[in-house]
Image (cartoon, rainbow, N blue to C red):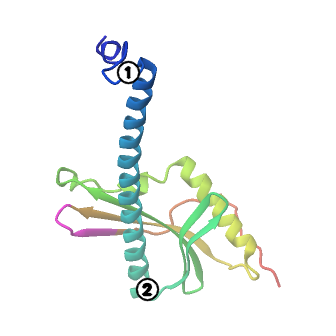
Amino acid sequence: MALVGIFAGTSDFGMSGRMRILCWLRQRWERWRTNWAAALARRRSTGWQGEAEAARYLRRRGWRIVARNWRAGRDELDIVARDGENLVFVEVKTRRVPEKMLDAAGLGLRAVDARKRKALLRACRAYLAELRHRPRHFRFDVIEIKIHKNGTRDLQHHQGVPLFPKFFQSKTHG
């Protein structure tokens, strides 16, 4: 009822009701678009910070980073690294954690749901298909980073997370 009252008839400036509705919709759209863009930039920034921290963590452990943000169509691998003879596909999940959720363990690991696993499997297969010499051993890891309000960070490394089908094997090309 209130919206009808606002937009009905003409305004003092001779603007029709239809034009007033269009102006109102445009203002709402601009406000939403601005807020959405800021939220997206903040989310991307959090993700990039987490991926950079995960890469530093892996390098400190002696791993060699082979690729970051490798894409196959719409699918992406955050980090591809070498751990000795193993090729490791690493998914990084970074979350800003409110103080009341300090106990929330495994949030990032649970975020790798069935849909995300399918996308990661497609990306891993595409990556392996592009290699000239495919590795004998490869695995999938998840690194979970929690950023607390005070700026401290917790990193958990989950190694050997089941992603590949049981009898999925790497074929060696000679």
Task: Tell me the residue at 77%/79% (across/down).
Answer: 172
- Is any part of residue 55 visible from this angle? yes
Q: Tag 1's secondary structure?
A: loop
Q: Which quarter of the rendered picture does the N terminus lie within?
A: top left
Element under disc 2: helix
Confirm or deny contact between disc 1 and disc 2 (CB under 8 A). no
Tell me the CA gap for discs 1 and 2: 67 Å
Q: Earlier along the polypeptide chain: callout 1 or callout 2? A: 1
Residue span colored magenta: 149-155
Residue at position x 48%, y 85% in the image: 63
Q: How many labels does the image show?
A: 2
Q: Which amino acid does label 1 sit on?
A: Gly
* Up-down relation of residue 83 to residue 164 (above or below): below
Query: Looking at the picture, how far across and down is residue 20, in whole percent?
Result: 39, 25
Mark 1 burial class by Cα count in 10 Å: few <14, some 14-19, many 20+: few
Q: Quadrant of residue 42?
A: bottom left
Q: Residue at x 63, y 76 (%)?
A: 137
Identify the residue under disc 1.
Answer: 14
Tell me, for residue 113, which label it has, or none: none
Q: Left or right of 153: which side holds 34?
A: right
User: Closer to the observer: label 1 or label 2?
Assistant: 1
The residue to which callout 2 is attached is: 59
15 vs 145: above or below: above
120 w.r.t. 136: above or below: above
Quadrant of the rendered image containing residue 10: top left
- The amino acid on which the numbered mark 2 sits, given as a three-letter code, is Arg
